[in-house]
Amino acid sequence: MPNYSQTVEWMFQQLPMYQRIGADAFKKNLTNILGFSEKLNNPHLNFKAIHVAGTNGKGSTSHMMASVLQESGYKVGLYTSPHLKDFRERIQIDGKEISEATVIRFIDENRSFLEDHKLSFFEMTVGMAFDHFSREKVDIAVVEVGLGGRLDSTNIITPILSVITNIGMDHVQMLGDTLEEIAFEKAGIIKPGIPVVIGENQVETKAVFNETARRLNSEIIFAEDLNAENYSSDLTGDYQTKNIQTVVTAIRKLNKNGFNISEENIYRGLLKVKENTGLRGRWDILQTNPKVICDTAHNAEGLVYVMKQLLKEDFRKLHIVLGVVSDKDLEKILPLFPKEATYYFCRPNVPRGMDADYLRDEALKYELIGSVYSSVSNAYQKALSEAQKCDVIYVGGSTFTVAEII
C-alpha cells in the first residue's frame, strides 16, 4: 500500500485540481460527486452542516464559526480549501486534522472507482471529508465551498444554514464576468426553506439573493443589519470586521434553531480561532524587527483592505515579496500596491504560477520597481537580508506564495 505522501501525490498528479491547473479542473455538474456519495452510502446525510460560500472571507468565516461551535462543546467538522502546507488541513474535527492513515485507507479502498469515473481532486476530497465526518459522528460540520456554489462538489448537502460572505470579481472565466452572474452561482447554495445569511450588502447582488430566497421560500438575513462592534478576534486583519459580523449573525440564527451558544462562547471562540482551528495566513505576523506580515488575499476586493492596513504600519521602508498565479487580472490588482516600496518578484511553485519576469514587466507599468528571483524562498531571503529592523516586509499575492514561507 502506498504511504501518505505517495497517496497525496497520486491525488494531486493523476486528476485535475483547480488550485494547480486552473479552469480545466472545474467540473460543470454534480454527477460525479453524487455517484461517489452513493458508493459511500451518502455520508452527507448523516450530519448537520453549515454551508459557506463567497468570493472573500469564506475561509476565515468558516474557521471562526467552527471555533465558536467548539467553544460551545459541539463536536465540529471543518472542511476548507486550499491548504497551506499539508493536504490534511482541509479536513479536521475539533481542530484535529484527518490522520494520514485515514487518507491512505480511504484512497486505497476507493481508488478503482476514482480512476474508473475520473473524479477530480476536489470531488474525491469532498467525498473523503463527508465520509470522515459521518464515521466520526460530528454534531455539525462547517463546509466551505471550493469554487462558486451552484456546481461545487460540496453542494450536495442540505445544510441547516447557508452563509454567503460577499461577491467579487474572481474566477470570472468560470463563474461569469459580472457581479450579478457570480452572485447567481454563489446563490446556488441557497436551499428551499433553509435560512441564508448574507455577509455584505452589495447593490449589484442584493436583488439576486432576494429573488432566489423568495423563490425558494428561504429566510434571508443581512449581517450588516447587526452591530458587532463589541466583538474582536485573534484574526487581526481589518477586513475581519465584516467576517465577525457575519459569524455572529449566523450564530444568533443557529440559537433560534435549537443550538445553545452563549455570548461567552462567541467571545472566546472568536478570540481563539488560531488555537482552535490552526488557521494561518490571514494578516499573519511571522516576526518583528523587521516585522514580517503575510496574507493570502489575492483578488482586488481582498487586497483593497490589506493594502490599506499595510500602509497604516509604521516603517522606514516597505519591502514586498510578490508572486501570483497566471489567471490573475493584473490590471485590477497591481494598481492597489504602493509605489513607495521595493519589490521582490517571484513565481509560486505550482503549474499555475505566473512567470516572475512577466509579473515584473507588468508591475513596471504601474511604477512598481523591483527585481526578479528564482523562487519565493530566494525572494523572501533577499528581502530579509536587505530589510533593517524598522522596516516592514509583506509577503503575498497568492495563497501559494504565502504557503512557501510559512
Image: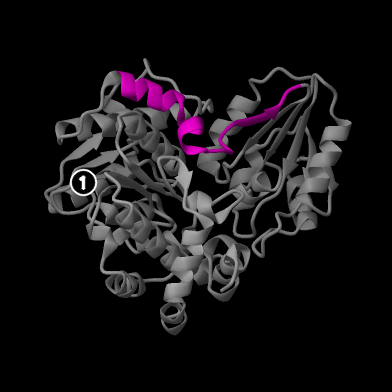
**Quarter of the image containing the C terminus?**
top right
Asked whether residue 286 is drawn in magenta, I would say yes
Q: Read off the magenta span.
A: 264-288
Q: Is residue 70 visible?
A: yes
Q: Residue furthest bottom?
A: 116
Q: Position of residue 193 (x, y in %)?
A: 13, 49
Q: Position of residue 267 (x, y in %)?
A: 37, 20
Q: Answer left or right for 381 relative to 350.
A: right
Viewer-closest of 31 and 366? 31
Tell me the residue at 41%/26% (across/down): 270
Q: Position of residue 221 (x, y in %)?
A: 22, 35
Location of residue 43 by image quarter: bottom left
Q: Is residue 56 visible?
A: no
- Residue assigned mark 1: 160
**Quarter of the image containing the N terminus?**
bottom right
Q: Amino acid at mark 1?
A: Ile
Q: Position of residue 18 (x, y in %)?
A: 53, 63
Secondary structure at badge 1 equals loop
Tell me the residue at 33%/52% (across/down): 136
Q: Answer left or right for 25 relative to 390.
A: left
